[in-house]
Amino acid sequence: MNRFNDSLMNFDDTKMPLQSINRIMKAAIDAADPIRVVERSIKLDKKHLQAGNKTFLLYPDSRILVIAIGKACLDMTRGAFNVIGDTISGGIAVCKHNPDKISKIGKIEVLIGSHPVPGEVSVHAAAKIEKLLSTTKEHDVVLLLISGGGSALVCLPAPGISLDDMKTVTSKLLRSGASINELNSVRKHLDLIKGGGLLKMAAPAQVGALVISDVVNNPLDVIASGPAVPDPTTFHDAKTVLEKYIGMQNLPNSVVDRIEAGCRHEIEETLKPEDPLASFAEHTIVASNKLSAQAAHEQAILEGFDSEILTCELIGEAKEAGKYLAGLVKTKKPRKRTFFGIAGGETTVVVKGSGLGGRNLEVALGAVNELAGSEKCMLITLATDGEDGPTDAAGAYVSGETLFKAKSLGLDPDQFLANNDAYHFFEKTGGLILIGPTGTNVNDLNFIIRLPDA
């Protein structure tokens, strides 16, 4: 909780109930605590392993293998180990951060991948997973622990596709404003571990997946690019995305060749829903944006606020979302109790400048002009993983005073928006929320606060 206190220490509007806001933010993050959500989702006895919604029958020769991928994988792995540690035969966990430099959790090897763009370590990790899963037999069970970031952390380029190709395509799509759904439809057709690829590797074993969702509405085929989920998208869909955001003429020849060959049905498609192998996996969502929003809502009520979950489907251009939220909070006219609105989702940014920032920071920057002079209003943006894009900030806070403070420092928010430089704007005005990596990831949360008139 202290990290939330620290994040708002420099906010100088003493009228705002800062301690209550801190507790609400903490409640939202705690609801997605990877250790807790995994521990309560697994049960084991001599003959059965329950993983979320599915119970698997264990035989004398059964092995339990653990594959964990994503920003929350270390704590998800710890949660699994706390419950079934002695029965785990082996496994691999691929994380983004490993601050304690852990090499193993029991018999599970810990590796580091690259994010948000895949690197050599991502390819190495995917190869290790493929090698381990090549040993599976019919009675084995693979416990798959999935969280956001998995698409980049683990990467197995298809034949003819290089890691540099994957980097180029990923970087261009990330900067173009493509949604995560669109980005991952492309990734799945250039990478052999995505779009059900891991499920193919695990066969004939059964797969029980526990998922911390970082995608709006929790589409299993999109989260970490659906390594054990049938893929409803096609090579034609991937081509449409590439044409829309990049242009085929601006892509590496190897990527164009593979996509075109796939569209001509010369290359096998990703695993499809009608494939019998699809029945070998069962997925359970154990944490999500909606669940964290609900936890924030319940804590806000305990704090005595008039709380409302506005949406968990906030998408679109980040700066426009900021204007929308700022306009919304100004229209609220609470009489006796502070209004606390919660908006979850994941916006996008079309990067045109050379500044530093992420979508949550840009949402906040987009609200600065709109909120100017609104004495009783506040907007807080929060990346639940604690890291907004390539920055060390989780987001920022904006009040009616932010623009005046910026002007006193000679700062123009529009200039910073044009350069996609929200980080340095809030670094100068004192609005950054610095809480460090949280070890989980369930999209973004935005909070709008309006004090009562009395």
Image (tube, helix red, strand yellow):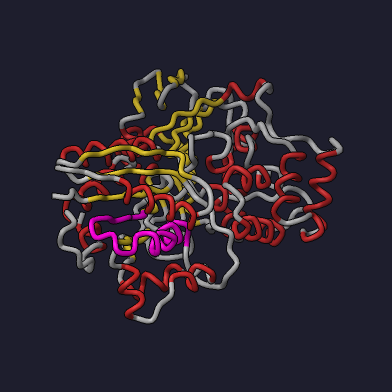
**Residue pictured at 34% horizontal, 60% vertical:** 371
**Residue pictured at 36% horizontal, 72% vertical:** 427
Task: Choose between 323 and 164: the one closer to the eye.
Answer: 323
Can residue 233 be seen in the rendering of this structure?
A: yes
Q: How many marks?
A: 0
Task: Choose between 204 and 27: the one closer to the eye.
Answer: 27
Asked if the stretch drawn in magenta spans residue 364, the answer is: yes
On the rendered image, what quadrant is the N terminus found in?
bottom left
Left or right: 454 with respect to 177? left
Can residue 73 be seen in the rendering of this structure?
A: no
Rendered location of residue 293, percent (x, y)? 33, 39
Asked if the stretch drawn in magenta spans residue 428, the answer is: no
In the depicted structure, whether residue 248 falls above or below residue 343: below
Rendered location of residue 263, percent (x, y)? 82, 39
In the depicted structure, whether residue 158 falls above or below residue 236: below
Task: Choose between 1 and 413: the one closer to the eye.
Answer: 413
Left or right: 17 with respect to 435? left
Q: Which residues are magenta?
A: 358-381
In the depicted structure, whether residue 4 falls above or below residue 308: below
Rendered location of residue 15, percent (x, y)? 15, 59
Left or right: 296 with respect to 327? left
Left or right: 229 with respect to 105? right
Rendered location of residue 281, percent (x, y)? 55, 26
